[in-house]
Amino acid sequence: MTIIYKYNSRKQVATPTELAVTPGSRFMIVRGKVEVPGDKSLTHRLLLLAGLAPGTSALRGALTSFDARSTAGLLRTLGVEVSPLRQGGEVTVRGRARFKSPGKSLDCGNSGTTARLSLGLLAAHPFRSLLTGDPSLRRRPMRRVTEPLSLMGARFDGDRPDRLPLAVHGGALGPLEWSLPVSSAQIKGCLLMAGMAAGQPVSLFEPGGRSRDHTERLLRAFGYRVDEDANGWIRFEPTGRLLPFDLEVPGDPSSAAFLVGAALLAEGGELRVTGVGLNPTRTGFLRVLGRMGADITVEETGARAGEPVGDLVVRPGLLQATTVTAAEIPGLIDEIPLLAVLASRAGGITRFHEVGELRVKESDRLGLIAENLRAVGARAVVEGEALVVEGGEPPPAGRVVTAGDHRLAMAFAVLGTMKGARVRVDDMACAAVSFPGFSETMARIRGR
Ligand code: S3P
């Protein structure tokens, strides 16, 4: 069955004119049908769960990016056999009931999800694990997970350490009831993983709206009880058991968002992005773009790994400013760089409320979105915890500093595809953290 949602049917397609993709380049229309790589959040979770499911699991369409490789590498150090991650290939994982004590430190690379989710699992294992990461990850806060894990009974070298490298001494854990300091699927995923690995109940409250619910859905599929009570608490009961599985991973909606953005900024044509994960806790950006007047049709075609999937059909058009509320932020946290560059082309002033969490992403993403928008001639400011972007007409031109942040690189590369743009991004290689083949895919959607 195909379910079609029409987010907006207004057609305001600009008359095709000359478009500069990079300095001096060509007329741009979008065309064709593309897939995006597998969902990053699901790939991490499925690899980790497969690692503790005794037997052989298979993942089709898994992400093969740098971040996914960090999780696969960590599992190998813990004695789990994981086949090489190859684009288009199947990944097999030979899981074990308990991880083996690692003989060396566990390198999480650039991946906060790898570090935080695996800490939850390692806290329930009776050995010392030393986790580290690249300079970006070593700057990111960890007390948000080491504090509740300490309450469950895990010990750390140092008191509730806040930065990597850090060492956890795991073992028998107790139950937990915990109100998260910020809505975060990484904190929630860490603590649910700890409850699962320790066989203990865990109750969690997310203060600012529901973050992505992949962990809850997957644990339910293995027979664990995960319910939300009348007061909004997530109640986990260790009623299930991990078994090997064979699943196909949906395309990553966060990666699809960049292609959607490029199609919206184009001068004409139509783009279809296929097989995209449509979990409602991930598709807040589509609702915001609908309000901005974007012409996007969502065709839900089925399900993969227990999540709805479908196609996004996008046509270019003029955009208007909107207000993004605090409650919407957890459902589009990774799409704010892209939405901000689109807001810089929309009529009016767009406000993103309560986006302070962006300061502790792969970079100070909040500061860098605003600085880079100004660097290319747009108007953007950080006001307290809000980001304010004013749309303007002059084509963007200038140099973008990514600080190695993949989502900044891709968002500004999208801006650089628009008519008359002269945008230089200092590092496009970092796109491979989440979207291998990003530049090639962008080239493929370009028509004449
Ligand atoms: C992720 C959660 C988000 C997101 C990150 C992936 C996950 O972080 O920014 O890219 O897979 O759990 P927070 O939930 O901590 O905001």
Image (cartoon, rainbow, N blue to C red):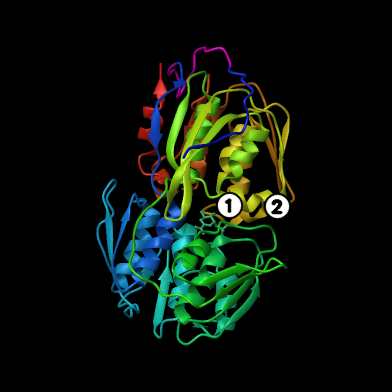
Circles 1, 2 touching at the beta carbon (< 8 Å): no
Q: Residues within 10 Å of mark 2 (few under 14, many from 20)?
A: some
Report the residue at 56% width, 79% height from top: 201
Alpha carbon distance from label 1 to label 2: 12 Å
Instruction: Work out whether residue 374 can be spotted.
Output: no
Q: Nearer the viewer, residue 362 or 200?
A: 200
The reply to whether residue 333 is in sight is yes
Q: Amino acid at mark 1?
A: Thr
Residue 281 numbered tag: 1
Residue 234 belongs to the span the image colors magenta = no
Left/right of residue 116 with respect to residue 143 in the rendered view = left
Q: Is residue 276 above or below residue 153?
A: above
Q: Amino acid at mark 2?
A: Ala
Residue 318: x and y, percent?
63, 23
268 over 35 or under it: above or below: above
Q: Give coordinates of residue 11: x percent, y percent.
A: 61, 20
Residue named by callout 2: 327
Q: Position of residue 70 (x, y in %)?
A: 37, 60
Residue 148 percent coordinates (x, y):
59, 77
In this view, the residue in front, 320 or 202, is 202
| Secondary structure state at the residue bearing disc 2 | helix
In terms of secondary structure, what is the magenta stretch mainly?
A: loop
Disc 1 Cβ-to-ligand 1 distance below 8 Å:
no
Q: Is residue 338 left or right of residue 83?
A: right
Q: Which residues are magenta?
A: 14-26
Residue drawn at the location 56% of the way across and 66% of the way down:
187
